[in-house]
Amino acid sequence: MPREKKADKQARIVEICRRMDEHYPRERCHLNYETPFQLTIAVLLSAQTTDAGVNRVTPELFAKYGTPERMASANVENVMEIIRSIGFYRTKAANCIKCAQMVLTEFGGEIPQDMNLIQKLPGVGRKTANVVLNEAFGIVEGIAVDTHVFRISHKLKLVGPSADTPAKTEEALLRVIPRELWGPVNHQWVAFGREVCIARRPQCDSCFISDLCPSFKAGSTR
């Protein structure tokens, strides 16, 4: 296929975002939480685990340790027992407690509203930071690149083969997606990845952006 011109790619991505807004106008985070701290813990727990799996353990977890004060003083074995059903529960339990302790000692009991500061919290990387800042505080400094966003970005040929990590993919997306459109990308593309562009069985024939997808045009659905 001929190389796509920059202006053509820009127009394509704007149209993709417009259609995502049309299909998922009120799409929000699927994790259950009541406070920024609880959201931070929930997103921390969601790494390599489904949102549904996290939502099954957080009611008990937050009932017992739903504030930084209670989580900071929790016994790690008790936290592990509650979240045992999700992946990497040992590491995540330790990070939950360490995160709460740092929130108390360094940030006055509040989740920091700053990209660099929030990433100092144990277990919090840039993806988690993007989700928390966007969802809890309405601060949009980037795009959270999870497995859905990573896969869809490459399938739509919005990023090149060299964007082979979530960090590189985010950098590439931020260059091609206008800043005013960054906010809803993660939640909308996650919904799209779950309902339409499903990893093992993409619904290309009924996809509402198939005409904008080079992979579909080339006859490849993988």
Image (cartoon, helix red, strand yellow):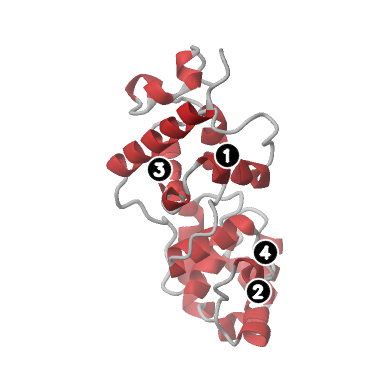
Q: Work out how far the residue at label 2 is from the one at label 4, CA to CA, in angstroms.
A: 7 Å
Residue sitting at 48 percent across and 65 percent down? 139
Q: Is residue 104 left or right of residue 26?
A: right
Residue sitting at 37 percent across and 34 percent down? 15
| Mark 4 residue type | Gly
Image location of residue 65, percent across then percent down: 54, 78
Q: Work out how far the residue at label 2 is from the one at label 1, CA to CA, in angstroms.
A: 26 Å
Task: Name which of mark 3 and mark 2 comes first in the sequence.
Answer: 2
Q: Work out how far the residue at label 1 is from the one at label 3, CA to CA, in angstroms.
A: 13 Å
Report which quarter residue 68 is drawn in: bottom right
Q: Which residue is mark 3?
A: 191
Task: Name which of mark 1 and mark 3 comes first in the sequence.
Answer: 1
Please say if the residues under marks 1 and 3 sit with CB atoms less than 8 Å apart: no
Task: Name which of mark 3 and mark 4 comes first in the sequence.
Answer: 4
Task: Name which of mark 2 and mark 1 comes first in the sequence.
Answer: 2
- Count of all numbered marks drawn on residues in the image: 4
- Of circles 2 and 1, the one toward us is 1
Image location of residue 145, percent across then percent down: 57, 47
Q: Which mark is residue 99?
A: 2
Q: Find numbered disc 2 in the image and state the secondary structure of the residue it sits on.
A: helix
| Mark 3 residue type | Ala
Q: Quadrant of the N terminus?
A: top right
Q: Is residue 195 visible?
A: no
Up-down: is 170 above or below 218? below
| Mark 1 residue type | Phe
Q: Which residue is mark 1?
A: 150
Q: Work out how far the residue at label 4 is from the one at label 1, CA to CA, in angstroms.
A: 20 Å
Please say if the residues under marks 3 and 4 sit with CB atoms less than 8 Å apart: no
Residue sitting at 56 percent across and 46 percent down? 174
Q: Find numbered disc 1 in the image and state the secondary structure of the residue it sits on.
A: helix
Q: Which residue is mark 4?
A: 123
Mark 1: few/some/many CA within 10 Å (<14, 14-19, 20+): many
